[in-house]
Amino acid sequence: MYNIPDQIFDQYNRAQVSTSMGLFAELNHAWVAIDNALYIWDYTHPNPQLVGFEDQPNSINAVKLAKPRPGVFLPSITHLLVVSTTADVILLGMGCETTATGARQVTLYQTGMSTSIRGLDIHVIASSDATGRIFFGGSSDNDVYELTYQQEEKWFQGRCSKVNHTSSRLGALTPSLSFSSFTHKMFENVEQMEIDDSRRLLYTLSSSSTIRVFHMKPDGTLALAITKPAMDIYANIGHIIASNETLNPKVPIVSISPIPAAEASRYHLMATTATGYRIYLSATGSYSWSPSPNGTNAPTSMQAHHVKTPPFDGGSASPMGPAFQGQGRFQPSVAKVPIHSLDPTRFTVRYPPGYFFCFTCKDPTQKTDTLFVSSPDSGRVARSQENVIPGNASETAIWLSLGSRAEDVGLCSPSTAALATPGGFGNELAVQFDNPAAEIAILTNTGIHIIRRRRLVDMFAALVRGGGDGDEGLEGEVKNFIRTYGRSETLATALAVACGQGVEISADSRLTQINDPHVLEFARKVFIEYGGRPTMNENAVADNSTPAIDSVVPSPRHAGIALYMSRLLRTIWRKEIAKVGPSPGGAQTILPSVPSAKLQTIQRDLSALQEFFKANKSFIEGLSGPEALARVSTKQEETALQAEHRALHSLVQLVSHTIEGISFILVLFDERVDEIVATLPDDSKQRFMKLTFEELFSTSKGHDIAKELVKGIVNRNIAKGSNVETVADALRRRCGSFCSAEDVVIFKAQELLKRATEAGSNSELGRNLLNESLHLFQQVSESLPMDYLVSAMENFISNQFFAGIKQCYDLIFKVIIAVDNLAAHDPGVVDGQLTVVAKRKNEAYGVISDSVDEVFLTSLYDWYLEQGWSERLLHANSAFVVTYLERKSADDIAHADLLWRYYAQSERFFEAAKVQFHLAQSAFTLPLGRRIEYLGRARANASTFTPDVGRQPRQRLLQDISNLIDLANIQDDLLQRLKDDKRLTSERRSQLFNQYADPASYYDICLQIFYLADHRNPADIRSTWQHLLQDLHDETVENGEPQPYEAVIDKVRSLGSRLRMSEIIFPIPTLLPMLERYALEHQRGVGPATWVVDLFLDLGVAHETLYTVLESMYYTDEAPFHGTNRKYIAKDLLYLIEHWFHDTVRLGGTVFGSDVVAERITETLLLLQQGGNIPPEQLQLANELRTRVEDILRTAVIEDNDGLWLPSYSGLEVVARDDVVHEEFGEPALFGLLETLDLGDEFAVDEEAFLARYGVDPDQWVDGIHGIFADETVG
């Protein structure tokens, strides 16, 4: 307890009108108002200085600390003091600074803001920390006023004024006027105001126990949402708890406390009755599906859902006298009998996550309060989620006799929420090591009492120190602890106590760490002896789904360690290490995301845990080493012990890595981080800014980034001329995994190189330093990174020091030459055995192939190529060949060619195709023909099957290659055409080549461009074909050879292939009439008469497609094919029909594909005969064709399996098959059929062979076919 200073009592003795007291607990300050003066002091200071405000004449009724609205006051004003007097409400600015000793110092500022409240007795003030809005009310009425303030005066509005949100303008202008004499209603005034910033709600409690809910709208207005009389509240809880003497509508409500949205989603407000009952209410929408109230929507109804009763009378937790204090657990229940333990309750407060303070006064004459404090037991709540303990978790409660009357209560250090959601908000166990425990200050007229929340780890330490009760003593208490909180939680708590986490309050009210040897020893004993054993999942082992060691569930001891570590690291684990923020100068700089003090605290706790593991390693099963295996009796126990060791060892390693990682971060931010990060490559900078503590402590990615940062730190110190050895040794000691002994040697060698450069390469000192640095590099040659090696070589070269590693490589090359020269004169194999020389050669090249020295192999392959031994490189049996060629191929096409050749030689055709594909698109200076060659090779390789390469990637690559080949062919055609075009001058050639194709009359190339671009405009396509034919004809006529029609045939055939017979770009209905017109107008009588039809037939165009177009041309009679010129179309049509007929007859199918088409063709042939525009020989051909087609339509001939032919007449088929012949006709009918049917000259049937084939008796053949066909004549 802190005493009230004597200066306050001195001022109190001078009081004439009124006095009041209160707390600014969050600032560790208290205040007293004596008449018109206000005094503030730091109650934690033994001899505090008073800060006073006496510059106004009226008595002070109330004082409230508030947060200012952003942007109104200077940054130095961190708080506002709202002072209510009998005449005005005054705003004072307050600045709070933290001194070097950690104390807070406040300063008051005059703001000049006040508003008149004459006629109002204001003693209730509430403020919103989120918005800075200030509300007040008092005993004169039940209205809610708001104090508005702004930086500057406006029209009709001063800097500070009040607004009445509940009454009319008349009521606001005449607040002292009372209407009670006219309405006979009970007078009602505001008793309490509370603000819930999470939902933007203002709650008020009136003297008649009516609760009102106001919605603070974002636009700055205040709307009344709900009015809830006490009668309604008691009616709501009637189904929860029966009405009794201490819980009925006559019992007033004395206090209300909002419950933030982050803490609870269902309950919004707690109301406490004068008898200590806690009623939990919700303010929701009118329907169950309505959204919960938030900053934008207001609630529409309020319901009571739960009631917590006071502790029972006469129990162990009841007050037995004014000096009694005790602690215990009680279970709030639905009691039917009245409970008077908290009757009468003066007022109550509630703080998240459920701390309840109830002030009662049993004897009004004594004017002393008894305090009842309760809080949820978060350990039991968490335990209840495992369904081990019933869901109604108990509370921990304590009675305190204050010895005087409580004036105010305030939260000094708020508890830290584990999560920002109701699901984990109140998990105090998870955050017990993050921040100091919550402290609540209680102001009485004798002093300030501080009540501190006791953590579970503190309770365990106090339990050990108390020695336990009963026969079992501490052992029984530990077992009860395990039953209550679970084994893992108990072990995590014992481990925390053993590592020095327990604290207690000393005699001088200071927190001290519990270091009593017997407490630490007992905690160690509990952790070791109650740790349990690993268990094996028998089901997983039985079905062989997982290895036996992976089926082991680690012991509760492992879970306890993991739980304790997770609570130490939870606040930083997912955070990024660095962030960008403003520097003191205003510029952007890189800052740590977690303060160094926090990191040092975590590191100190982890170091204590690491020391605990080292000291107790031999006693902890799973860490004691191989000797523990001697104590197992079965294979299962051995497997379980191995799994336990693996699990515990991983945690021990994580502790070690985390300690080193934190040391590294502290070292990093001790340096100029901006300059260090600036030396990193761009991708490394981005990875560092996104690097989290988790990645740094537990992944190779974080380790790699840390190694790069270490290099940056050392390089910066080298550039500054600092002693690198000191820096590197410090890094190695504090974070050895990020800076090894080899790294220190490398750093020293680098420093020697820099000093040699400064001393001069030709000086004796410089040469000695170079030799010394070379010696150091040789010591770490196996682990020397490439970038360091390159830097060292560059320094050696610049200092003309060539006696380094290159000399060693040159000696190796001489050995290779000697081996090759010796082997050149050796047969290699004698009598099936390798010669000695051959063996030595194989040994030498074996050593080379087995080398993993990247620098050596790079030099070796460079030397191979210098000697012209590219084939030797291609036959090298080393995985580094691909790496070497890939790195070199980026800058040299010769190496790229070697790369795809190496892939092809290794039958990795897909990779070879990708290299060739990229070469075809590369920036190397290559002729177009070479690029097309690469694409052709790539297509061949991609078409070849490659193991481990799926079909989809190959098809995708082939598609890409084909598209590029098409484009390249167009480019090549255009290039060749431009080269051969005599119209182009040399200065215009380049421009036309790069920009134009159509103006140059390259219509065939334009058509290919149309095809690749999927251009579908028929007019453009028709026009381009017409221009193509005309230009081609003119060119061939001018040249004299070949014949124009021959050039047209070649060009159309070539384009048909290139355009893949596209129906859009190669349209037959357009091209066939166009070519027929060309043949008539330009090539009449030249060449074969049917060359147009033959061209399309050669291209594979279907007969029916050509027939349809020619038939349409003949029928439409359009120019130039009208009159006598129709005979040219008739000739081609007749030629096509004849060709089509012979094709279908030869293939043995239905003539012309179907009977319908055949009938259509007979009609066309008849029309050709009747037209009279064709020569006699063609008339005769048309007649013959028509006759044969009609005959075939009447008589369909089919062939049986043995080559015997039978006719089909009038739809009646006779097939030479046993089942058909005997079933349809029978033997007599078959004889008559064969005798009667005339098969004509083209078909003949050997009757004897047929009868022998089917075993028919010739004597039974009868002439009965005439009966079947009646009088019809068989044709």
Image: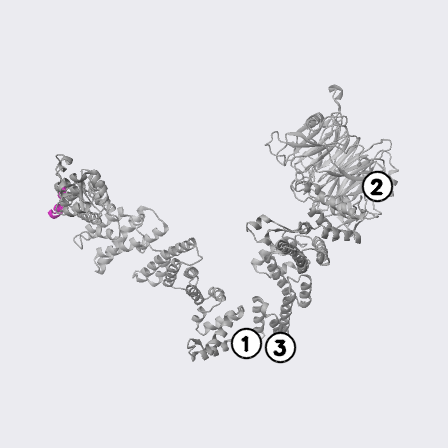
Tell me where residue 1218 appears, x and y as whole percent. 22, 43
Amino acid of disc 1 = Gln
Q: How many marks?
A: 3
Pick the quarter of the image with the N terminus: top right
Q: Which residue was labeled with disc 1?
A: 807
Whether residue 135 is visible, yes or no, is no
Q: Which residue was labeled with disc 3?
A: 767
Q: Tell me which label, 2 or 1, sits earlier in the chain.
A: 2
Tell me where residue 1162 appears, x and y as whole percent. 18, 41
Q: Is residue 724 above or below residue 215?
A: below
Pick the quarter of the image with the C terminus: top left
Residue extent of the magenta highlight: 1169-1180
Q: Is residue 684 above or below residue 1177?
A: below
Amino acid of disc 3 = Arg
Amino acid of disc 2 = Gly
Nearest the eye: 513 or 839: 839
The figure's colour scheme reads one colour
Q: CA distance from mark 2 to mark 1?
A: 86 Å
- Compared across the picture, whether 514 is left or right of 660 comes to right
- Whether pointer 3 and pointer 1 mark residues with C-beta atoms closer than 8 Å, the reply is no
Element marked by disc 1 = helix
Element marked by disc 3 = helix
Q: Which residue was labeled with disc 2?
A: 447
